[in-house]
Amino acid sequence: MKAELIITAFLFAGLVPASAQASFGAPYPAACGPKDTGFDVSLDKSQHPLAQPEEGKARIYFIHDEGAAPSLWTREKPILIGMDGAWVGANSHNSYFSVSINPGEHHICSATPYNRQVKLVALTHLQAEAGRVYFFRTRVIVPGAVYNLEISSVDNDEGEYLIASYPLSIFHPKR
């Protein structure tokens, strides 16, 4: 117990890398956006209907799920979402947003904002079909004081439940 407290103190002080995904100075992977981009995020707690795909397109929802115990990472830092080399948005706390995408293969990145000490990155891909709705969930997992960022697809029932439970993320690039 005492050793866990000491390790946790070092992690919070920023003296020890917080994840095997940590990277010092390396650029984000190609699926992400540029490292000097940031977002200000606010939450719209009003109810929003599930948006359907535009004609000939697919719609993808990105949900950040902190569960019952919010992560220290997202208290001050949003989770950035990139696709095919550009940032498409950001979530903060338990929240979601959606984007319209063209059919075809897409490479998806979720990441914490770039800083000098550590960043977390998780990657996946999607073969999107026109007329379909997709849901992806990000989570910051903290097993034994090691932070990991995960992104995974969730089925439509769970995705619809999560977006009905969480506020909409409203994001703007930082200036």
Image: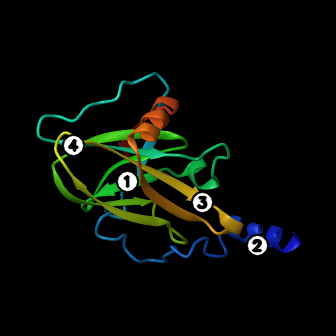
Disc nearer the start of the sequence (3/1): 1
At 50% from the left and 67% from the top, the residue drawn is 119
Mark 4 burial class by Cα count in 10 Å: few <14, some 14-19, many 20+: many
Q: Secondary structure at mark 4?
A: strand
- Describe residue 120's horizontal placement relative to residue 80 as left or right: right
The CA span between labels 3 and 2 is: 16 Å
Disc nearer the start of the sequence (4/2): 2
The CA span between labels 1 and 4 is: 17 Å
> Circle 4 sits on which residue?
58
Looking at the picture, how far across and down is residue 49, in whole percent? 36, 24
Q: Secondary structure at mark 3?
A: strand
Q: Are marks 2 and 1 in contact (CB under 8 Å)?
A: no
> Is residue 112 among what the camera can see?
no
Tag in front: 3 or 4: 4
Residue 7 marker: 2
Amino acid type shown at disc 4: Ala
Tag in front: 3 or 2: 3
Amino acid type shown at disc 1: Ile
At 76% from the left and 67% from the top, the residue drawn is 9
- Judge by depth and name the residue closer to the eye, 66 or 152: 152
At 52% from the left and 74% from the top, the residue drawn is 22
Residue 81 marker: 1
What quarter of the picture does the N terminus occupy?
A: bottom right
Amino acid type shown at disc 2: Ile
Looking at the picture, how far across and down is residue 70, in whole percent? 64, 47
> Circle 3 sits on which residue?
141
Q: Secondary structure at mark 2?
A: helix
The CA span between labels 3 and 1 is: 17 Å
The CA span between labels 2 and 1 is: 29 Å
Disc nearer the start of the sequence (2/1): 2
- Judge by depth and name the residue closer to the eye, 62 or 2: 62
Disc nearer the start of the sequence (3/4): 4
